[in-house]
Amino acid sequence: MNFQWYPGHMTKAKRQMQEDIKLIESGYRACGCKNPLSSRNPDIDELGKNKYRLILMNKADLADKERTREWSAFFKEKGFFVVSLDARSKSGMKSITDIVMEACKEKIERRPESVGIKNRPVRAMVVGIPNVGKSTFINSYAGKACAKTGNKPGVTKGKQWIRLNKSVELLDTPGILWPKFEDQTVGLRLALIGSIKDEILNVDELAVELVKFLKAEYPGLLAQRYEVSEENDIIELISAVAVNRKCLSKGGEPDYSKAAALIIDDFRSGKLGHITLERPEI
Ligand code: G4P
């Protein structure tokens, strides 16, 4: 299966980012806790060289807590400030402010005299691939619906500066992918978390890959949720899900594709459990 998806608006957004990056002092890289590594965009890394030191590992509520701890330690070890969060819940935002402020403080202290008064707000930018929760984070953090959120990859539009507090101004940017995934496993993981437009994906094949992964890494989860035997081969297992969950075609036959879509939806929404697709190589 080929996962490449780099529509025209992303080329444009990347060009815009090239310009915007000159305006900011600090970058916050947003990624999903389910796949912190494959959601790292090499183009953004290149553009933001030496600018971002803070990693926002979002959707922590959906991920495997043990893996999130491992990833957090991994990034800290590499010298990043790290926050793991559920951007939809406003409750954790206070502790996040402390870390954001610490990351900013470093920037302020390093300001050359030419930048002017020391206490001017730090201009920062949230960057990342589509659908990792950039807009939701900004909305929760700024305390009002100021960045447009939506359920389609690439929905964040335009350029908007948001005054978070007297110390930080944040620039929201559209999510971008990169033109070619050298490693198709990266494409697969991005497709699974919903960062690639579903319309270009083969959902049946995607579900096969997900079931293969879950059987190996999280044995028992599929059996528990769908009352199916994991001893079955993958196609039989998905067909059994179709029967048990009454995923039926118009003629009343078990509908394999509906079951495949259901498994992917349940994975994305966390109904299948706390799952992380990758672990750091220590
Ligand atoms: P983006 O700017 O990076 O593209 O992402 P955006 O904020 O639009 O969020 C994409 C989807 O992820 C939204 O769901 C949003 O509610 C959800 N989301 C964001 N942060 C979190 C989180 O920490 N945990 C969980 N579980 N979900 C999160 P949606 O279903 O596409 O839209 P809606 O139902 O919220 O309208």
Image (spheres, helix red, strand yellow):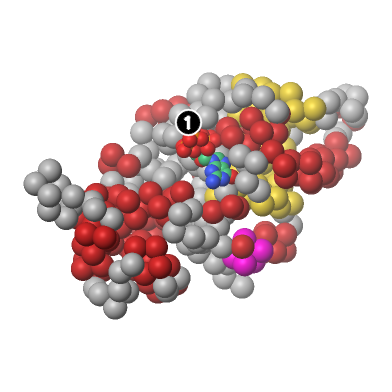
Report the number of numbered marks: 1
Q: Nearer the viewer, residue 67 or 49?
A: 67
Compared to residue 267, the image places residue 121 above or below, namely above
Q: Residue at x 25, y 75 (%)?
A: 232
Q: Amino acid at mark 1?
A: Gly
Residue 114 image offset from top left, x and y in percent:
86, 27
Residue 169 appearing in the image: no
The residue stretch that appears in magenta:
66-70
**Dominant secondary-structure state across the stretch colored magenta:** helix
Residue found at the very far bottom of the displayed protein: 231
Residue 242 appearing in the image: yes
Ligand 1 closer than 8 Å to label 1 CB: yes
Residue 3 image offset from top left, x and y in percent:
32, 49
Instruction: Name the quarter where the N terminus is drawn.
Output: bottom left
**Mark 1 highlights which residue?**
150
Residue density around tag 1, few if under 14, some if 14–19, many if 20 or more, within 10 Å = few
Asked whether, in this view, residue 9 is left or right of residue 37, the answer is left
Q: Residue at x 22, y 59 (%)?
A: 243
Q: Residue at x 42, y 55 (%)?
A: 267
Asked whether, in this view, residue 105 is left or right of residue 7, the answer is right
Residue 102 figure quarter = top right
Q: Nearer the viewer, residue 126 or 232?
A: 232
Residue 58 image offset from top left, x and y in percent:
60, 47
Residue 209 image offset from top left, x and y in percent:
32, 62
Residue found at the very far left of the displayed protein: 251
